[in-house]
Amino acid sequence: MSLRVTALTDPAPSPGGHRLAWLAADSSGTPLGSAFLRVFTREGQDHLAELDIQVHPAERRAGVGSRLFDAAAAAAREAGRRTVLAQARADSPGDHFLRARGARAVLTLTYARLALAEADIEALRRTAGQPRPGYRLVSWHGTVPDGLAETFARSRRAMDDMPMDDTDFGTVVWDVDRVRSAAAAVAARGDLLHTVAAVDTADSTIVGFTELVVPGDGTGDAQHYGTGVLPEHRGHGLARWMKARSVLRAREDHPALEGLLTDTADSNVPMRRVNDALGYRPTHRSVEYQLDLPQR
C-alpha cells in the first residue's frame, strides 16, 4: 500500500504548549489515520509530550500506525523532549501496539461512572451535610472568584504527590494566571466548570478542591477533573465531603445530566475508596505508556 504522511500545523497554540499533527493517507488521498503530539512548554513539564494515534480499524496492521508513531517520536526528540506518554484502553489494539513499539507500561487507571438515576441521594446528603470541625465548603461556577484566587492557586500543590507510579509526568506549576487560563479554556469550548472547595476556618485558606466539567447543554455525562487535599489536612474526610457536595450540586443544577465520570490510578487507594463509597462503578481500565527518548 502506498502511504503518505503529511505534517499539519496547530492553529491555536496555548500558553502551556502546542500540538503537532500528522495525517496518513493512501495514494488516492483517503485518510487512514492521524497522530497528535502535544508538546508541553510550561516550567516543570517542559521535558514532556503526549501522543494520541488513531488508525481506522480496516487499515490496521499495515504499517500506518508505525509510520505515524515514528514521525511523532522523531518530532518529540527534535523538540528536546525526553518523555512521550500515550494511553490506551487495556487489552485493546492500541495497548498491544504501544507495547510492540517499545513503550513501557507505567500506570494503570480505572475509569468509573456514577449513574445519577441510581445514586443514593440520601446517603450523599448525609455525607455532604456532616460537619467537619475546622472546615467549611465553598463553591463556584467558572473562574474562581478574585477573593479566593490566590489561596486556590496555592492549594493546587495538593496534586503534586498524586500517585503516578513510574510516570515521568513532572510537576505542574500553578499560579493565578494558570488557574484562570484553565477555566477560560473550559468555557471557550462551551463546557461548564463547577468547583467545590474546602476552606480552613482558622485562616480562610482553601485546603482542598474538586472540579467537575459539565457539557454545555447540561446533558449526557460530566467529567471529574482534579480532586485534591493538601497533605497537612488529610485524614478528615474532606475529599469525600467535597465530592458528595459536587455530585448533589450537579444533580440539582443540571437535572438532565445522566452520569459523572472519573478516572483514578489503581495505586491511588484513598481516592478509589472515596469513589466506591459514593457509588461510582468501574467501567474499564486504561494503561499509560511511556517512551523514553535518548538525549543528544
Image (spheres, rainbow, N blue to C red):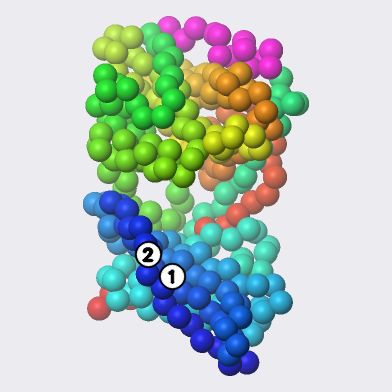
Question: Do the residues bearing badges 2 and 1 touch, measured as CB atoms within 8 Å?
Answer: yes
Residue situated in front as seen by the camera: 292 or 86: 86
Judged left or right of residue 131, residue 222 is right
Q: Main secondary structure of the magenta part?
A: helix
Q: Position of residue 208 (x, y in %)?
A: 40, 25
At 38% from the left and 36% from the top, the residue drawn is 183
Dot label at residue 10: 2
How far apart, in angstroms, are the residues tagged by discs 2 and 1?
A: 7 Å
**Looking at the image, is 12 positioned above or below residue 67?**
above
Crowding around mark 1 (Cα neighbors within 10 Å: few <14, some 14 to 19, many 20+) is many
The image quadrant that residue 136 belongs to is top left
**Residue kind at label 2, given as amino acid type:** Asp
Residue labelled with disc 1: 21
Q: Earlier in the sequence, mark 2 or mark 1?
A: 2
- Tell me the magenta residue range: 121-133
Q: Is residue 26 magenta?
A: no
For marks 2 and 1, give the one nearer the viewer: 2
**Looking at the image, is 116 positioned above or below residue 283?**
above
At 57% from the left and 74% from the top, the residue drawn is 33
